[in-house]
Amino acid sequence: MKIQINEPSLPKSGALLIGVIPDRKLLATGEQIDKLAQGALSRALQAGRFTGQKGQMIEVLAPAGTGLSRVLLYGLGKPEEIDPLTLENCGGDAVKRVLLSGEKDLAIACDPVPGGKVSLADAAARIAFGAKLGSYRFDKYRTKLKPDQQPSLVNVNVLVKGAPAARKLHQPLEKLADGIFFARDLVTEPANVIYPESLAKECKKLEKLGVRVEILGEKAMEKLGMNTLLMVGKGSVRESQLVVMQYHGAPKSSQPVIFAGKGVCFDTGGISIKPAGGMEEMKWDMGGAAAVIGAMHALAGRQAKVNAIGIVGLVENMPSGEAQRPGDVVKSMSGQTVEVINTDAEGRLVLADVIWYAHTKFKPRFIVDLATLTGAIIISLGAEYAGLFASDDKLADQLFAAGKAEGEKVWRLPLDDAYDKMLESHIADMANVTAERGAGSITAAQFIKRFTNNVPWAHLDIAGTAWTKKDKPTIPKGGVGWGVRLLNRLVADNFEGK
Ligand code: BES
Ligand code: MN
Ligand code: ZN
């Protein structure tokens, strides 16, 4: 599917979307079409409960006098409340409505909205971006799709006055979409296809964007003493990997930011094995790594003026005769020892070594880690917000603002010495889980904090947000690529050219 932004001219065929604001008010292009169709749209607007509220949509088929095969009337809601995300949803909803309809061409009229706050150029760029995001499909394993089950839509044309300005704003968003799609694919792929080595190979693809990609295998990690990571992968026939992706878009003197990701390509729980029901979901336990890879893809793709390093720890958590046992004591790269009470609390063991490696090898400005870390965060926040934990208030605020702007919302939970104490072990420096019932997500964050060595750090628990069971306008059911937008915005708003 191709997306273009062009100067307005009334299409004479295909599908056309026009905006409507309350109460049943057509925007400029709608008025024009209504005239040609001798009032067909006004009559349609009176025929039902559609009033132009945000997200409402009705379809008028083949209105006479227009040549169009369908007109979509889309509710934008109150002008002063129209924000970039509303416009992305408009693009996404439009594409979804016609994707399989038999329609090849969709035009979307981006008209000025009296009283609206988003500039026309930005509005068009956001509509185009949303259209792209909403078109995402993962069909590669379907061999039996009939022609009428396959997308028919080929061209999306966003019509706006001052198209060149809109195109310019759209450019970096296209690169962002590439990063998001890359992450969605990785999250959605099954674990027999995406395992540590094959995922590392996917990272190598970033080299063509100018990213330096270094892969460390088990031998190299053994030398570094990354035993908490290695012991998680011990039960697997797949070799564990550490991938370091370096993108330099700023002068050498500019301190890098580091994004670290949990990349558990499949989490059976290990010897502390999970129940069978729903275990297939654990193929997306590498959603944190996917976000980091996707963000690096986006930053390099749009040539962001920043030095950014993405580090992902890739393992498979399997039970076997060689797997680590509950009660084993393992020495991490930091030198601290961990009693592994529960082998299913493996993400923190991976991140312990990844984060220690990150700040000892590089002198980062900060580290943000993303991980599908705990089921408990789903109990706390459901699928709407990711959990945010931070040792640095400013970084926390920046992440909060970035999340709000991008629709990847985060909510901060506390860290406290009292929670840290809950990780005490009888025989080692710490246990990997608490013996108490509560605060499962917080104690997991406290565990990771012990490996940050006072580098400004934030942790995002994305167990509830990495995968969506609901179809959304710009996020089809499945892998979200959650975090790519957030990290990209964090950089764009705070760390570019600094
Ligand atoms: N990968 C899981 C967390 C998870 C659960 C992600 C559901 C996505 C959906 C993690 O490795 C895990 O198993 N966590 C345990 C920790 C417990 C053993 C302390 C959990 O949440 O049950
Ligand atoms: Mn687990
Ligand atoms: Zn896990």
Image (cartoon, rainbow, N blue to C red):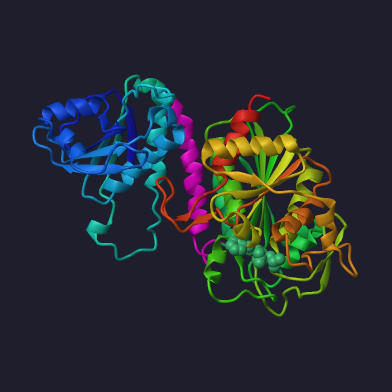
Image x and y of residue 485, in percent: 54, 40
Name the residue: 34% across, 24% down.
Answer: 113
Write down the quadrant of residue 441 in the picture.
bottom right
Q: Which residues are magenta?
A: 169-194
The quadrant of the image that shows the C terminus is top right
How many labels were placed on the picture? Answer: 0
Name the residue: 76% across, 75% down.
Answer: 325
> Is residue 64 toward the left or the right of residue 351 in the image?
left
Instruction: Say above or below: 23 vs 338.
Output: above
Outermost residue on the top side: it is 162
Outermost residue on the right side: it is 427
The quadrant of the image that shows the N terminus is top left
Residue 293, can we see it?
yes
Instruction: Say above or below: 73 vs 196.
Output: above
Outermost residue on the bottom side: it is 321
Q: Nearer the viewer, residue 463 or 302?
A: 463
Instruction: Say above or below: 492 vs 409.
Output: above
Name the residue: 62% across, 33% down.
Answer: 491
Residue 220, can we see it?
no
Q: Nearer the viewer, residue 467 or 222?
A: 467
Q: Nearer the viewer, residue 240 or 91?
A: 91
Name the residue: 53% across, 74% down.
Answer: 277
What secondary structure predominates along the stretch shown in magenta? Answer: helix
Write down the quadrant of residue 320 in the picture.
bottom right
Q: Nearer the viewer, residue 484 or 360?
A: 484
Image x and y of residue 140, in percent: 39, 59
Q: Is residue 170 magenta?
A: yes
Q: Is residue 3 magenta?
A: no
> Is residue 234 toward the left or the right of residue 96 in the image?
right
Write down the quadrant of residue 150 in the picture.
bottom left
Image x and y of residue 62, in percent: 13, 41
